[in-house]
Amino acid sequence: MTPRQLINLHPLMEQTSGRPEVLVGLIDGPVMMPHPALTINNIRELAGAQTGTCTIPNSWACLHGTFVAGVLSATRESVAPALCPGCTLLLRPIFPEITQEHPTMPRTTPDNLAAAIWETVAAGARVINLSLALETHTSQGHYQLKDALDFAASRSTIVVSATGNQGTVGGSTLTQHPAVIPVAAYSQQGRPLNLSNIGASIGRNGLGAPGEEIVSLGAGNSSHMLTGTSAATPFVTGTIALLWSLFPAATTAQVKMAITSSTAPGRRTVVPPLLNANTARTRLQHLVERN
């Protein structure tokens, strides 16, 4: 079963490829541009300390940023899942191209992430993808991060965040915030991967998405494969972007209700249910028509 089949995504993708007025924030590494499978006209860079375009193509930051961008914004004819290429992708790079190491998931500090969230929300992002983890060696910046997430909520921006790949039970400033939809990784057979972090807030507010051996864009004409929650997260982000493209009058509350309540109401488990994109589409249509 393909990743898109696993979450019943094809009916939604057949109805829309996204609308340019739906801005999707990508806080990640820089992206390889130009790229034969990315449409530059639908990508915007936010001014920051570093460019949104890769300068070291084989750096982990570049590979990761390009991979996630491919899941969201690659052309539908490419090897990538290419969920919402018609939406506008806002690039806000946060990982420097200074290492060749391949960590299980790129990390950043809470204060750096807070600054990036403020900028991306202020630029008009409707939904923000965070395929990243927080540094665990610092206790600094968590108040700033909470303030940034509060700002996102005040602007009706949905933040979608990876739960992490340590296989632990618990939570973080990110996964416990009500503005955030935490995402755990599921296998090709539709079972939660053992590496996914889980917890009470994750099970209550989060979703599962395909995260095993996901193929997307790599450097140049090559492809790149990743397993983990950072690969799963853009499937939820892209689904939200498509839902807003199909139902532009929907409120943030309606979109969140449709996508999270389309799975298992009254959750009492630490493991989030698997996303069902088509059920979310049907539910959102009913919510919009009812109002």
Image (cartoon, helix red, strand yellow):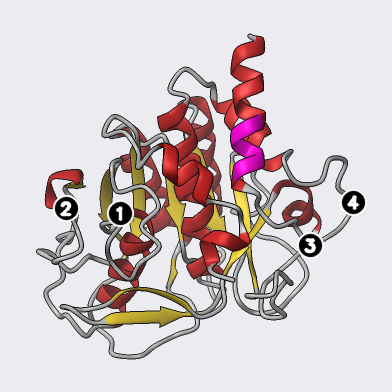
Magenta span of residues? 278-282
Q: Is residue 140 visible?
A: no
Residue in front for this viewpoint, 89 or 243: 243
Pinpoint residue 7: horizontal percent, then vertical percent.
Answer: 61, 56
- The reply, left or right, for residue 253 in relation to residue 63 is right
Count the numbered circles shown.
Answer: 4
Residue in front for this viewpoint, 175 or 88: 88
Residue at mark 1 to residue at mark 3: CA–CA distance: 28 Å
At label 3, which amino acid type do we have? Val
Residue at mark 3 to residue at mark 2: CA–CA distance: 36 Å
- The residue indicated by pointer 4 is 268
For residue 271, the mark is 3
Marks 1 and 2: in contact by CB < 8 Å? yes
Front tag of 1 and 4 = 1
- The residue indicated by pointer 2 is 39
- The residue indicated by pointer 1 is 73
At label 2, which amino acid type do we have? Thr
Marks 2 and 4: in contact by CB < 8 Å? no
**Tag 3, which secondary structure?**
loop
**Label 3 or label 2, whichever comes before in sequence order:** 2
Pinpoint residue 222: horizontal percent, then vertical percent.
Answer: 23, 82
Marks 4 and 3: in contact by CB < 8 Å? no
At label 4, which amino acid type do we have? Arg
